[in-house]
């Protein structure tokens, strides 16, 4: 019985770890421009809010070049718990890694880097 319980707990831990570090893929065309949000509600404490100026970077996975100025604009905090930005452009057939950095009024700093943009 102990072995079954330990195995079950281990599997639950593996599943939770997998989903906590899940990579999200967003498909778009080079023509499309739309707002995208990263919600930090589950990362911050009750009453804590995002502050300052968040940053979003976009790196071309093939070349490794930072293409943020071509693909990202209008970065802002939305509803005190989300980073909002306009996603635009890109080259058809290319993929890009996004990284979102933000801070809170309690001094916490977060870097979310699990978004892949697939331009098709």
Image: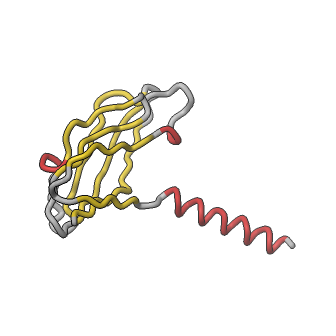
- Residue 93, percent from left and from top: 18, 69
Q: How many marks?
A: 0
Q: Is residue 6 left or right of residue 58?
A: right
Q: Give the quarter of the image for residue 8.
A: bottom right
Q: Is residue 39 left or right of residue 19?
A: left
Taking the spot 29% from the left edge, 61% from the top edge, the residue there is 27
- Residue 86, percent from left and from top: 24, 43
The vertical placement of 97 against 52, above or below, is: below
User: What is the basis of the colouring in this image?
Assistant: secondary structure
- Residue 60, percent from left and from top: 19, 61
Taking the spot 14% from the left edge, 62% from the top edge, the residue there is 91
Quadrant containing the N terminus is bottom right
Taking the spot 39% from the left edge, 59% from the top edge, the residue there is 24
Q: Give the quarter of the image for residue 5.
A: bottom right
Taking the spot 33% from the left edge, 42% from the top edge, the residue there is 101
Quadrant containing the C terminus is bottom left
Q: Is residue 39 left or right of residue 100?
A: right
Q: Is residue 2 left or right of residue 99?
A: right
- Residue 7, percent from left and from top: 73, 72
């Amino acid at each position: 019985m102990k072995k079954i319980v330990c195995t079950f707990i281990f599997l639950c831990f593996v599943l939770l770890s997998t989903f906590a570090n899940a990579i999200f893929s967003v498909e778009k065309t080079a023509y499309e421009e739309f707002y995208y949000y990263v919600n930090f509600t589950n990362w911050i404490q009750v009453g804590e809010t995002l502050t300052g100026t968040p940053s979003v970077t976009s790196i071309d996975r093939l070349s490794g070049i930072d293409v943020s100025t071509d693909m990202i604009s209008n970065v802002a905090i939305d509803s005190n718990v989300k980073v909002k930005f306009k996603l635009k452009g890109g080259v058809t057939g290319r993929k890009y890694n996004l990284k979102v950095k933000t801070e809170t009024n309690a001094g916490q700093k977060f870097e979310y880097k699990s978004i892949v943009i697939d331009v098709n």
